Amino acid sequence: MFAITTLHFCPLVHLLIHCSLLGNAIDDPPGNAADQRKLLGRWNVTVQGKEGAYPSWFEIRLSGYRTLVGSYVGQFGSARPIAEVEYNRGVMRFSIPPQWERRSTEVVFEGELVGDELRGETTNDKGEAIRWAARRAPALKRDAAPAWTDPVPLFNGRDLEGWHPRNAAVRNGWIAEDGRLVNRQPGNDLISNGRFGDFKLHAEFRIPKGSNSGIYLRGRYEVQIEDNFGKEPDSHEIGGVYGFLTPTDNPSRAPGEWQTYDITLVGRRVTVVLNGTTIIDRQIIPGITGGALDGDEGAVGPIMVQGDHGPIEIRSLTIAPAVESP
């Protein structure tokens, strides 16, 4: 009787053991699962380039049971997908095809956790090894809705007082002309001396046919300005937070016509109103966009107007900072 009972129950026992092992195999990714999960989240990266440090960004997410995927923003360009983030014996690695980089090889990031940081190596466009380090991006959550101060002008209509070019070694084509801030000879971005946390920004601008510019919030998040009259909305075109947030509509006007932006930034949440139409409503900006001044997202930052792409004119630019801005 005992032998028969054992014979009948053994397959069931084996099945239960097999299911248990299979469940563990599905739940636990290869390598050290606890360390792997420490990679999840958004990371602000500082890359030690040969010509100086520059900011970058990536996010790592879990897809399914064990596959790590993500998004990446380089020194220039827009956010692009990471198909898979490898993790083996404590080393993280991912590669992506070039976008605006002047290279034929993939961009490869490799590194490991060192305390609260990720540190590692990548290569520049010449194939030279350069170091990078990443810290977790802050959540930038706010406990309450802010109160606002009265708007103040960022441009006085007479000269460039309160502004400076991004690169002193590069030609600055910005001038004050007939009460307008004009990028007469594109080649340099223009940065406000003032730095801000949460704010409401109002801008009145116009661009000629085919032109391209943008306004960087805190010097880190570009709201695109481009001649896209009549086109479908796109995160890379007018009204979009470049490569991240796509407008719900495109109420842009024809080139040569004056247009308005009303932009509210609270923590990571942004609202964009183009020509009186709300096209992005309190959406979260995941991270810095290409061309950002830095990746210190927890700090205040300036307003930067992109000037290295195309001409633009601005006749009004005002800001209302929060009463208690970080």
Image (tube, rainbow, N blue to C red):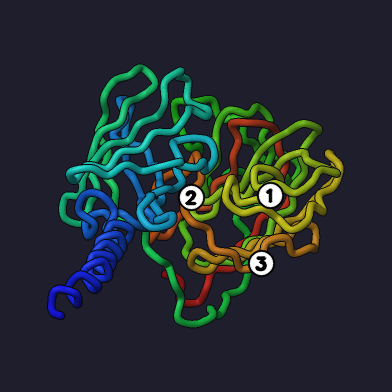
Q: Quadrant for the C terminus, please.
A: bottom left
Res 318 quadrant in image: bottom right
Q: CA distance from mark 1 to mark 3?
A: 31 Å
Query: Type of residue at label 3?
Result: Asp
- Residue at figure coordinates x 25%, y 61% from the top left: 21
Q: CA distance from mark 2 to mark 3?
A: 19 Å
Q: CA distance from mark 1 to mark 2?
A: 25 Å
Which secondary structure, mark 2? loop
Q: Which residue is mark 2?
A: 220
Residue 20 can be seen, yes or no? no
- Residue at figure coordinates x 69%, y 43% from the top left: 237
Q: Which residue is mark 1?
A: 157
Q: Which residue is mark 3?
A: 281
Disc 1 or disc 2, which is closer to the eye? 2
Q: Nearer the viewer, residue 39 or 194?
A: 39
Where does the image place residue 147, in percent across and percent down from the top left? 55, 80
Q: Is residue 97 above or below residue 275?
A: above
Q: Is residue 179 left or right of residue 2?
A: right
Query: Type of residue at label 2?
Result: Arg
Which secondary structure, mark 3? strand
